[in-house]
Amino acid sequence: MLKNTLFLLLSFLTLNLSAQIERVEPAFWWVGMKNPQLQLLIHGSEICNRKVEIQYPGVKILKVNRPCSPNYLFVTLEINQKTVKAGKFDILLKQPDKTDLSFTYELKNRRSNSAQREGFNSSDVIYLLMPDRFANGDQKNDNIDSQPEKMNRSIDYGRHGGDIKGIQDHLDYIKELGATAIWCTPVQENNYSRATYHGYAISDYYKIDPRFGSNDDYANFVEASHQKGMKMIMDMVSNHCGIWAWWMNDLPFEDWIHQWSEFTRTNHKACTIKDTHASNVDKKIFTDGWFSETMPDMNQQNTYFWTYYIQNSIWWIEYANLNGIRMDTYTYNDRDAMSQWAKAITDEYPHFNIMGETWLYSSQDIAFWQKDAVNALKYNSNLPTVMDFILQKALSSCFNEHGKPWEDVGMNRLYNTVANDYLYADINNLLIFPENHDTQRYNYLLNNDLTKYKMAMSFLMTTRGIPQIYYGSEIGMSGNKGKGDGDIRRDFPGGWPTDSINAFSSKGRTPVQNEYFNFLSKLLNWRKNKTVIHNGLLTHYVPENDVYVYFRYNDSEKIMVILNNNETDQTLKIDRYAESLENKTSGTDVMTGKTYDLKTNFTVPRESVLILETH
């Protein structure tokens, strides 16, 4: 009898230890969302055959889907927005002859005007930074037991210890510079054994990497940024996950990721997406091939995964109060799925903005991916902002070269790129940039020439689009991608207690660093209140003698920009610009305060720029 009793007791304990709910995603949701449906992913041992029950006014179960793995349930709820109220309720999982399982779920109230939040736009200047390389604000999270990779600043591809608190501690620095939005490379968990600092191999889509901080730390950081008048853009990755993502040892469905008989890398041929002559096999390898051996390719055609991912994006927007998303490797995803994703977000948040990484090699290729683009395929991406890699390519060389008027060199590169703006549905929603975390450092390309840097930044801040700068550029930081990505992702000086230079303060910067910073800060802070730059019209003139002149104007203001990339002083023949100048007779340079007579010709010094507020 005792033996039987012990057996029954041990069986009961084993059942209760093995039968448990390990994960529910999303962990909570909100009332008042436009889309009334919510899909719950429930993960636990042997739960797929359980019956799901909910008793809560305004919430009903539409369907329960039982995937291939016995350890998952996908439960779709309908939330009646007219009758439901915020609150907590139990969800029961029942099965005959087994102990009932349950968990408490919560529907929260949204922030007031949450759906009307303002996204980033052409009035902003975006500051791109890598959290691991910016500043170490909390040394207690440098190493975490659950994370296999530990801090090691001696290797360029290792974790260096930068974190969310480090960024938050230096928000005043970013504000002083004049940036109005922050884009951090991914902050979600990357639980791999090496090279996790960049963040693009996510292992848990609902969790901030503990070496950066917690979910609450991130939400508080966003709020602190808003208090300083800066918007927040979250870097997301839908194309692939990390090889150690929590589901990789127990996929819900076999086609949750794209699987091949042997490792197959993407061919990087983005043109196959819209090439009417492309073979199916080439298109498949591009979209379904893995980005690397450590980045499994996600299957956006699996409706359960795609619903999961769309909800994850909306969850972060609502939870952290975001102003924008930057989507990595945008063109590598399933084309129609990405259109669905972007529309779901902008339907929920009409004034929100999303930019996609469109690293392509012609303006027409990039324009194809922008919302409302005209194309023979009748495809609408619903993606508001595309990244102007063609302008980035032009900027990478134009200030280092000179040529004949008919050649695509020097200032003609800028002119020719802007001349293709007719291809875009919305030129104000072009992200423009000279560099980012994947390209050569811009100061390296300019041979650390401050004069050329001033010309480049003046152009970037006065042409059409949304400017983005890369951390450290504003103090002259350089780096050679030829030495590896670590060299273009160096630690910001002053972000670690042992740093010999603290570039976060004017006293800690070198004279040269201050010259970089002071110039850019003055330019950015001037731009903040210039609606004529944010969304004014643009007229430009074919460069002569490597001098590029253009005007930004609206009904109340007109700005004349003169870029002299020539190695000699140039006389500006003012009559040539009569149609734009009209009755304007003088112009005051934004940076020096000097006033120029616009009724007569004048000399523009070699390799210089004038930004003239005309009168």
Image: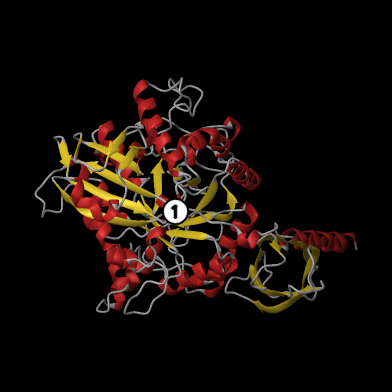
- The quarter of the rendered structure image containing the N terminus is bottom right
Residue 566: tell me if it is visible. no
Residue under label 1: 122
Residue 577: tell me if it is visible. yes
> In the drawing, does residue 96 fall left or right of residue 136?
right
**Frontmost residue, 215 versus 280:** 215
**Percent of width and height locating residue 119:** 53, 56
**Percent of width and height locating residue 412:** 18, 52
Within 10 Å of disc 1 (Cα), the crowding (few <14, some 14-19, many 20+) is some
Question: How are the colours assigned in the image?
Answer: secondary structure
Determine the image quadrant of residue 43.
bottom right
Q: Residue furthest left?
A: 404
**Frontmost residue, 447 versus 277:** 447
**Frontmost residue, 339 versus 564:** 564
- The quarter of the rendered structure image containing the C terminus is top left
SS at badge 1: loop
456 vs 337: above or below = above
**Percent of width and height locating residue 475:** 38, 31
**Frontmost residue, 203 versus 71:** 203
Q: Amino acid at mark 1?
A: Ser
> In the drawing, does residue 6 fall left or right of residue 473?
right
Determine the image quadrant of residue 519.
top left
Which residue is located at x 43 percent, y 28 percent? 493
398 vs 162: above or below = below
518 vs 371: above or below = above
